[in-house]
Amino acid sequence: MRLLIVPLFAAACLWPQQKDEWPQFRGNPRLTGIAASTLPKTLKLLWTYDAGEPVESSAAIADGVVYVGSGAGYLSAVDLATGKARWKYKVSPEGVGESSPAVKNGVVYVGDLAGIFHAVDIKTGKALWTFKTGGDIKSSPAPLDDRVLIGSYDGTLYCLSVKNGAVLWKVTTDNYVHATPAVADGVAYISGCDEIFRGIRVADGTQLFEFPSGAYTAASPALAGSAAYYGTFSNEVLAANLKTRKITWRYENPERHFPFYSSAAVVEGKVVLGGRDKLVYGLNAATGKVLWTFTTKARVDSSPAISGDRVYVGSNDGRLYVLDVKSGAKVWEFEAGSPLSASPAIAQGRLVIGAQDGRVYCFGM
């Protein structure tokens, strides 16, 4: 294990009271993976929805509706209470990959594998506008008040007007923009496939800083206090100090050398994420020290969601796991029978997750 420790800033983070929704990837603009909703101690399968083809992205949940994209080429709006489709919107035939829908101010946004970014009216399911990028879109949208951010495999982070999709600014990198931008205090942070971590001012696209991560990075950063946490393809988890703009610590499993594709959740001084070594990790946010690990039977690309004192995460072994956030002990599991690379979405007392066989599962009480 390579571990560099210097005094760390506070890892705890406070932000305005979160509405009981899951409106975007990781639940909020800081991408912390923390739910405002409390789930029942014992989960019950309430309904399933057949999306037709693999569901690799996370659902969004807002105002009693689940929004989910699939490889079948549709963005679907599904009633959270019943699992019945309200409408289906046709994207490109290539379908939706890992781009998770995001909802704000009556609009749902999603990118597809043809590189087209869609803004759809949540009431009618009709397109308000589309924007064509030059590559696949696997990044998830980050909607703000009058603009929305989206990354593309053409190497660009775009800032578009929510009114008509006009380009307000763009920042070009040296490789794919796969990660979803995390946003705090008017700054967007992206961990890059070009091995560079960037801070970009949302107002005008000015790059405020950059520093090397030292590795190809597909995971999105989670922000807590003055820290950003993310895993890399060099088999490391990093903590970056956003004030000093330096890496504070690096963690690497001394025995299992596999990439981290899962985006981290951060809660109560803990960083929780999955690894392609089949493990779910709980790390100390201040030092990078391992607090616990939990072993699944396949790689964990799913990004954990946290509600109360429990961690919810899928595995490519086809199971949804519920773990104790303090100890990593398994509390419950559900066997879907198909890989769960998508991440859970939690809102209004329910958990929604899609599987690679096209089924979307809703659990609650």
Image: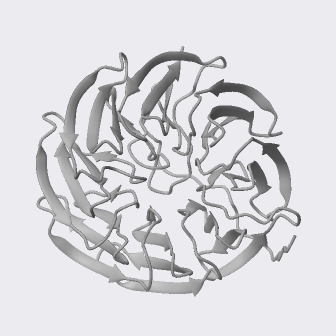
Whether residue 129 is visible here, answered yes or no, is yes
Query: Please, is residue 289 above or below residue 268 in the view?
Result: below
Give whichever of 203, 257 is nearer the camera: 257
Q: Quadrant of the C terminus?
A: top right
Rendered image quadrant of residue 308: top right
| Image mark count | 0
Give whichever of 89, 190 is nearer the camera: 89
Position of residue 265 in the picture relative to residue 90 (left or right): right
Query: Please, is residue 206 above or below residue 62 in the view?
Result: below
Q: Residue at 44%, 62% (x, y): give it.
A: 180
Q: Quadrant of the N terminus?
A: bottom right
Rendered image quadrant of residue 263: bottom right
Q: Residue 19: where, in percent of width, then height?
A: 42, 37
Q: Residue at 18%, 64% (x, y): give it.
A: 131
Q: Residue at 52%, 22% (x, y): give it.
A: 363
Position of residue 111 in the picture relative to residue 350 (left or right): left
Q: Residue 10: where, in percent of width, then height?
A: 70, 63
Query: Please, is residue 219 above or below residue 333 in the view?
Result: below
Whether residue 349 is visible here, answered yes or no, is no
Q: Residue 144: where, in percent of width, then height?
A: 31, 58
Give whichever of 65, 194 is nearer the camera: 194
Give whichever of 197, 343 is nearer the camera: 343
Position of residue 11 in the picture relative to residue 206 (left or right): right
Identify the image's colour scheme: rainbow, by chain, secondary structure or one colour.
Answer: one colour
Position of residue 145 in the picture relative to residue 212 (left or right): left
Rendered image quadrant of residue 213: bottom right
Q: Residue 242: where, in percent of width, then height?
A: 59, 75
Q: Residue at 30%, 74% (x, y): give it.
A: 203
